[in-house]
Amino acid sequence: MRMASGLQQPFRNAVLILVWSWLLLLVLVPNLLVIAASVMTRDAGSFLSLPLTLDAYRQLLNPLYLEVFLQSLYMAVMTTLVCLLIGYPFAWSLSLMGPRARILLIFLLIVPFWTNSLVRTYALKLILATNGLLNQGLMNLGLINEPLRLLYTEGAVIIGLVYLLLPFMILPLYSVFEDLRKELLMASHDLGAGPLATFVHVIIPLTLPGILAGVMLVLLPAMGLFFVPDILGGSRNLLVGNVIKNQFLDARNWPFGAAASIFLTLAMAFLMFAHRLSKRRIGEEGA
Amino acid sequence: MLQTLLSLDNVSKAFDGKPVLAALDLDICDGEFLTLLGPSGCGKTTLLRIMAGFEQPDTGSLTLAGEDLTRLPPERRPLNTVFQNYALFPHMSVYDNVAYGLKMEKRPREEIHKRVMEVLEMVQLQNFARRKPHQLSGGQQQRVAIARAVVKRPRLLLLDEPLSALDYKLRRTMQGELKRLQRELGITFVFVTHDQEEALSMSDRVVVLRDGEIQQLGTPREVYERPANLFTARFVGETNFFPGRITSVEAARLRVDVMGLERTLQLPRFEVSEGESVNVLLRPEDIRVLGPDDPQGLPGKVIERNYKGSTLDSVIELADGTQVLASEFFDEDDPAFDYNLGEPVRVSWVDGWEWLLPEESVAAAPGDVDEDG
């Protein structure tokens, strides 16, 4: 025993140092740089310069950007709702299946991750295009006479976002459904609650941490995945992610891009806080 | 005779083609404490679930006070369940757990409050109303589960091994509590357990189940003293079996040769004829251990002595290897009482204390009993 721990000690330290330097170099330092950039002045030559100013944050309140933000939030919320509506029953039925079917379906859910999401978004473009698979299929079936305009619409962006983000909704939901004890549902029925009352008073509260985790994993990326509107959307279907990308790559306004990033990060922190609260409510944490 | 509250008629159930309950009939009386006793896999939990409505019987019907329950979903049955692992809602306080059933009945808020506090007081948890289930001990959670079920004032309370998760001492306390509650509330209790001691001490009547069939239905005393078959005899308490051969049948008596010992026994309830084999059953407390020179009894030697406080339990091996369990009350004034290991003794019993069962295959007796149901 003593020898084993003697050998483990340096290994343990090495791992800890690795993890901490990773977090320091790739999380803390970049974030500090973003914060620093957000309070500096825009500079045409070297991107950033002194003096320190809050101009970038003031610019965030510009009605033009507010509109982009609201449009982006709208698409992200729609994406999240669609993911929740598909993911919730999917995860629930998944938890009720036999182990073999369950493993197969989870495997199928993970397979798309093996292909780069940019490539998959281009594939989706081929399906949704005017002469794409979907339109041709519908026309061959005689359901429509002329191709539908699917591509370069808000709908296309939402379809793309749902397609990319759905697994992130299903997996946390599946994990809470797997922990949901069947006796609790039986107890609810036993005490006189019908299926609907049981759903509202027992199933939803107990799966709330999964719902919030899923929402967190879908809503924020849905505001940031800029390449989806770039490929599938029209000129008006901008995400906050597009704004940030444009500020850094096209408009060369780094302070403003940084401020917008910080805004997204704060929104995420708020959602994580809500998630923690919901978990504490059902007594998963604390004594 | 008491009125029948719940009546099960020809109830059977199979899972994946494997029968669990076989054409079972059972009448549960109003106000009684009925225990379903049996080893794991005997169908007792399935039977309880059919009563609660969580399982549908393949055949047969359930009638509660004249109303057909068979197709009624659990939420519409006037009976409640105390689950084995309590199944308390983890996201609700003790108060909300107990109030849940009344809220579902859409009772007025004041009535809910009054009834919840009443029942919490009854289980001595009035000061824990705001706690969450995970902040309570096992025994307290158990009491919340009971409070949550009885606050609805059900006609019948189903209890699925409710004490199996508690330690021995707490279990004994809760057994007393449950009996007290049942008396105070006047609710019919159907209690599932695999613990025969618990069944005997708590019940008005015991149903002994095995492989989905009722082996015996009777008062604890009947089940213990007059078991219907070898299974019941072995499952309920410790038993010694002696093979006997009937040498002659008289008007009210029977002469039986028990391992070479000629005994005069009472006529059993079943048909007997000369030359037949019977099982002579004796509970350990009915066995008398005599000195080696005693003219009566079967010779053997003491191979185990266990001091149990009020009794002295010994195992005596007979000449043919049969082991006999004897449990004797202490008699400090009797110098001959204590035997040493290996000491030759004779075992006997008072005529009339034995119980006769017809010969049946010994393979029908249960092996060891699992702890879970």
Image (spheres, coloured by chain):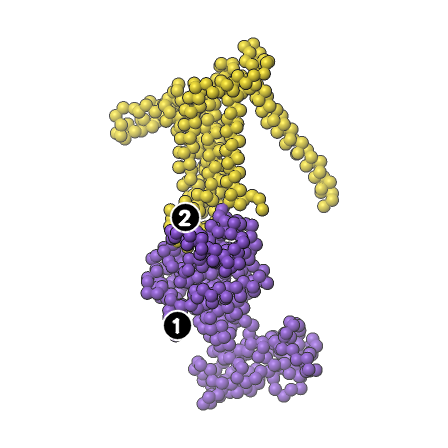
Chain colours: A yellow, B purple
Which residue is disc 2 drawn over?
A198
The answer to whether residue A242 is above or below residue B279 is above
A43 vs A52, nearest the viewer: A52
| SS class, disc 1 | loop
Q: Label 2, secondary structure: give it.
A: helix
Q: In this orientation, does residue B371 appear?
A: yes
Q: Residue at x 69, y 75 (%)?
A: B341
Residue under the point 43% across and 46% down = A201
Q: Would you identify the image quadrant in which residue B71 lies?
A: bottom left
Up/down of A245 relative to B213, above or below: above
Figure quadrant of residue B9: bottom left
Q: Which residue is mark 1?
A: B2
Q: Residue furthest top?
A: A45
Say which residue appears at 27% left-offset and 27% top-offset: A144
| Badge 2 amino acid | Thr
Q: Nearer the viewer, residue A14 or A72?
A: A72
Q: Is residue A277 left or right of residue B101?
A: right
Give the residue type that dot 1 points to: Leu
Q: Are marks 2 and 1 on the same chain?
A: no
- Along the line of sight, the residue nearer the viewer: A179 or A244: A244
Residue A272 x %, y %: 52, 34
Q: Position of residue B157 (x, y in %)?
A: 44, 61
Which of A102 and A160 lies nearest the eye of the viewer? A160
Q: Residues within 10 Å of mark 2 (few under 14, many from 20)?
A: many
- Spot occupied by residue B46 in the image (x, y as percentages of width and height): 43, 60
**Residue A258 horizontal side relative to residue A152, left or right:** right
Q: Is residue A120 visible?
A: no
| Res B27 → quadrant | bottom left
